[in-house]
Amino acid sequence: MARKVIYWVTTVLIAVMSALAAFGYLTKSPQAVQGFAHVGYPQQLRVLLGIAKLLGAIALVVPGLPKLKEWAYAGFTFAWIAAFIAHYLAKDGPKAFMPLVLLVLLAISYVTRPAGRQWSARAAA
């Protein structure tokens, strides 16, 4: 039971934070636009990541679609590693480590997934 609670708490936190970030990215919030400019990313990437984060957040919480969930976990992993590197190189201090905190939450969500939310590569082959 505790494992299920941990899964849902971390997964919903990730989904909500990603959906809020996607909203900011896609509505051109000044903070998002300035943040991407600050780390040297083009604004087109902000739009692409906004769409990807929204779709990833949805994929993590809807039932079924275990293969799509795997892709969402992978996508968030790559995005947050890149975000950490970008903020670290921009000398953003402690703020640079926030993507790593999200990555830890993502890892907890991933390892506590119920069997029905896992994708078996052998079963798909």
Image (spheres, rainbow, N blue to C red):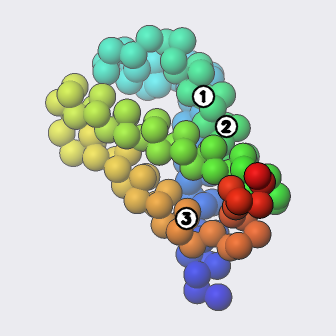
Q: Is residue 20 visible?
A: no
Q: Quadrant of residue 23?
A: top right
- Few, some or many C-alpha atoms within 10 Å of disc 3 (few <14, some 14-19, many ≥20)? many
The disc, 2 or 3, on the residue closer to the chain's N-terminal end is 2
Look at the numbered disc 3 and give the secondary structure of its residue: helix
Q: Quadrant of residue 2?
A: bottom right
| Number of numbered markers | 3
| Whole-number angstrom distance, CA of label 2 to CA of label 3 | 17 Å
Residue type pointed to by label 2: Leu
Question: Tags 1 and 2 in contact by the CB under 8 Å rule?
Answer: yes
3 over 41 or under it: above or below = below
Where residue 54 is drawn, which disc sits there? Answer: 2
Expressed as whole percent of the image width and height from the top left, the position of residue 48 reads 59, 21
Expressed as whole percent of the image width and height from the top left, the position of residue 120 reads 70, 61
User: Which residue was labeled with disc 1?
Assistant: 50
Q: Nearer the viewer, mark 3 or mark 1?
A: 3
Residue type pointed to by label 1: Gly
The disc, 3 or 1, on the residue closer to the chain's N-terminal end is 1
- In the rendered structure, the answer to whether residue 58 lies left or right of residue 111 reads right
Residue type pointed to by label 3: Ser
Q: Is residue 8 visible?
A: yes
Expressed as whole percent of the image width and height from the top left, the position of residue 86 reads 30, 28
Expressed as whole percent of the image width and height from the top left, the position of residue 15 reads 62, 51
Query: Going 74% across and 56% down the picture, which residue do you hit?
Result: 66
User: Which residue was labeled with disc 3?
Assistant: 109
Query: Going 55% across and 64% down the picture, which residue do you hit?
Result: 109
Query: Going 38% across and 45% down the picture, which residue do you hit?
Result: 99
